[in-house]
Image (cartoon, rainbow, N blue to C red):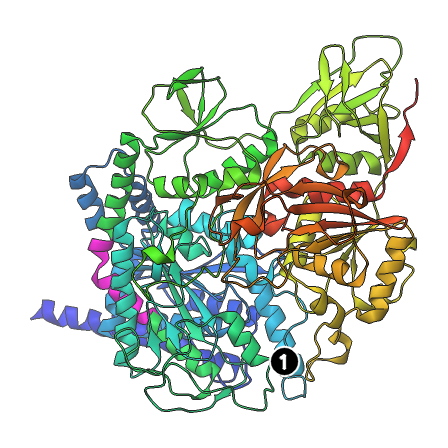
Amino acid sequence: MMQRALRLVIGLVVLAALSLQAQTIPTPAEFVGHPIGADKKLVRWEKIVEYFQLVDRASDRVLVEELGKTTLGNPFILAIISAPGNLQRLEELKKIQRQLAYPYELDEAAAEQLIARGKPVLLITCSIHASEIGANQMSLELLHRLATEDSPFIKNILDNVVFLLVPSFNPDGQIMVVDWYNKNVDTEYEPSSMPWLYHHYVGHDNNRDAFMLTQVESRLVTKLLYQDWFPQVYLDEHQMGAQGARIFVPPFMDPINPNVDSVIWAENNLLGFAMNAALHEKGLTGVTYGQMYTGWWRGAFLMEAWWHNIVGLLTEVASARVATPLEQEKTEPGVPARRPEMDFEEFMRAMERDPSKPIPAPQDTIARANYPRPWLGGTWRLRDIVDYDQVAAFGLLDAVANHGVTLMKNHYLRGRRAIEQGKKGNPYAYVFPPAQHDPGALAELLEVMHFAGVEVHQAEQAFTADGKEYPAGSYVILLAQPFRAYVKDLLEVQKYPDVRQMPPGTMRERPYDVTGWTLPLQMSVKSVEVKKPFEAKLTKLAAIPAAPGKFVPAEARRRAPYGYLIRPEPNNKVIATNRLLKAGAEVYWLTEEVTLDTTTYPVGTLLVRGQNLGTQVETLAKELGLVAAAVVQPVSAKALRLRAPRVGLYQPWTGSMDEGWTRWLLEHYEVLYTTLRNDDIKAGKLGQQFDVIIFPGDRNKRAIVEGDQRKWTRAEYKGGIGEEGVEALREFVRAGGTLLLLDSSTELGLETMVLPVKNVLKGVRGEQFACPGSLLRILADNRHPIAYGMPAEASAVFLNSPAFDLAPGFSYTDVRVIARYPSTNPLQSGWIRGPEYLQDRIAAAEVTYEKGRVVLLGFRAQFRAQPHGTFKLLFNTLHYAAATEATLPRR
């Protein structure tokens, strides 16, 4: 009796403590002063952080960590939510996760013991695209319910899941979107879109940085995933267009990537249907799966998880106008779809219509297995988005709690299976010889893979593999490792499936995004696929070393060296050039090959002269992985004298992602530039300020000249450069300036100036030619200054880009070809329709225009900071614009 009474008292004390805890944590609505998801109300990032920290202090179920600072210095936070007993043993649970993720010596019996002690881990990230703000707002209510509710449903989740919640993958953008919306709400400008990117550098492309890892936020989440926690499941919550379905949940549609373990697809389906069921149980309509989003491409962080043995999931909820309700005309059931998919661009076109009028009624309301209760139109609010996101999240949490043992075991088994597959070979390894065209590019390739959890080895001695000898120092990535699929998919050539070989209606008629991403091709890195097992003395690297530099000093003499030669192949040569020019050194490009003693230096080699430069050049060589040598005797060669170029980068008031990536790349390589807006160009006299002006590759002539003309756009952001700006650019080039036009912006030059080239793809229909994102072979003239340092063959990223040929009445005396496509099919990785349209066409050219030049780069030479092999076309153009012919000093 006394024991029962004591247990009763303890139980009452615990209940009272829990009740007091719940009382001390205000609801999100109480904390922010309005219901979450209320019309025209948004919670800004600092208030979300404050609430998460408050719950952390008040609840023993929640731990909040700051993982680091964002690009603009805001806190990037993670909430770890679980039962108090689980939180007290987090380090043990993390250790179990790592052992399951890297199961080299872990047999099944030992794994089962770990699984019995462990807990499944689920990560949810919210609103990587900042205008898709619903999940970010929802995170407050998700946190509150888990921290305060004592129902059996919540208790089951807390006891059986370690839940990692990132309330915003893009805090900087969240702040921008909230501030812009609040500035315009209840004014005539309320429907206007933000005139700049909602990530400082890359905007909507921030989820496309999932394997190159250039951005701060990308690295924070990648470290969380593949260095710290190794979750079994990862859900990324997004929003989509508002024309039809209300929410997409997995399964994905075809094609699927063949490198992904088949159990990933099975569990993707299992957990997707769990979210599906939860949504239907709540009576929510417009739930769909198996359409719109494919299982093929490396387009987001959740997809990178697939190749890491993690179940990566996506939700896409229909969008409102940020926090303003959206009206859609109503329709009846049974309306057939005009086409089997919708996309974000379609939604944006609908949003550009008069916001005072409803958007057109849904065109897909036929009930079917993957869309049983279609959305029929009506009012759609931010609150609806919050509800759909929250129901899906709890449906997933419940499923992970109930299937935790299976999820953990399959996670372990996928790693074991990958190791065993790798041991069998085909392929067995990828080998990277130390002698590379650009050793710095190799170091970057290995570093981003290593950061994402890939194990990299280096050979201590020479070895033989597949009958070929490799020297000591070669880097080796063995496929007998848990993340075998990740290695294989990044390093091999992609072959996108032919729709004609698939069952009718199971996949898009043509892909809508990138289909090829092979890193060695993009980065001009030599890698060799080794099929059969081999023996070698290898050391596993704890970190990837920087590219080794080499400096050859002058022989000891009384007089100073004539100068210093720096080879042109490494991209880091650009950084060295900029630093030396800033220091006041004389810097030259050699425009012809030179042999000194027994060493031959190619065209494009740098000659650096000045007082007391030896130490600086040696430091630069070792820091940046360059090959440099002091020379005593005078160099006799033709040359161009370089000076620091005055660079202008056009930034439209329409948020150009290509401009953002270009801006990031210029800063990364220490190129000084000035941002140019419409009014800056229209003001004219550009030659007094700039040597070269860059136009980004995702804006065509109309977008540049006309800009945003919508009536609800603020006057200061309306319009483009206009005819006034076009004339200013003509005058700039006529007077000697360089106009650098990338991809789509080449249309600006072709249609506003009389140039001797034409776009051969203009007017070609999609059923004749299409290439939405592939790697194509180009032949570069590396004796042209813009291609200095490039190999004779390289890979170009082609995204529905232009290609050129001579215009009628002109000859090649009017054009200097920098690169062209071969006379055979140029496809290297990905997918193309109608390759004959590109054969032997011009890919990049320099066109003289009176005293100046127009440089046409018909592809994205700097695409998403990935194709290191073509970066030089951008950087060399900048230095070429400020170069002058020079006679080298004789002493």
Q: Position of residue 453 (x, y in %)?
A: 42, 41
Residue 375 visible, this orientation: yes
- The amino acid type of the residue labelled 1 equals Asn
- Exactly how many numbered labels are in the figure? 1
Location of residue 703 (image quadrant): bottom right
The residue shown at (48%, 81%) is 382
Please state if 705 lies on the left or on the right of 363 as rendered. Answer: right
Q: Which of these two is toward me, 617 or 476?
A: 476
Q: Which residues are magenta?
A: 393-407
Secondary element at image label 1 = helix
Q: Position of residue 82 (x, y in %)?
A: 32, 61
Label 1 sits on residue: 182
Q: Is residue 341 above or below residue 734?
A: below
> What crowding class fits label 1: few (fewer than 14 Cα within 10 Å), some (14-19), or many (20 or more)?
some
Q: Which of these two is toward me, 698 or 54?
A: 698
Look at the magenta stretch and give its main secondary structure: helix
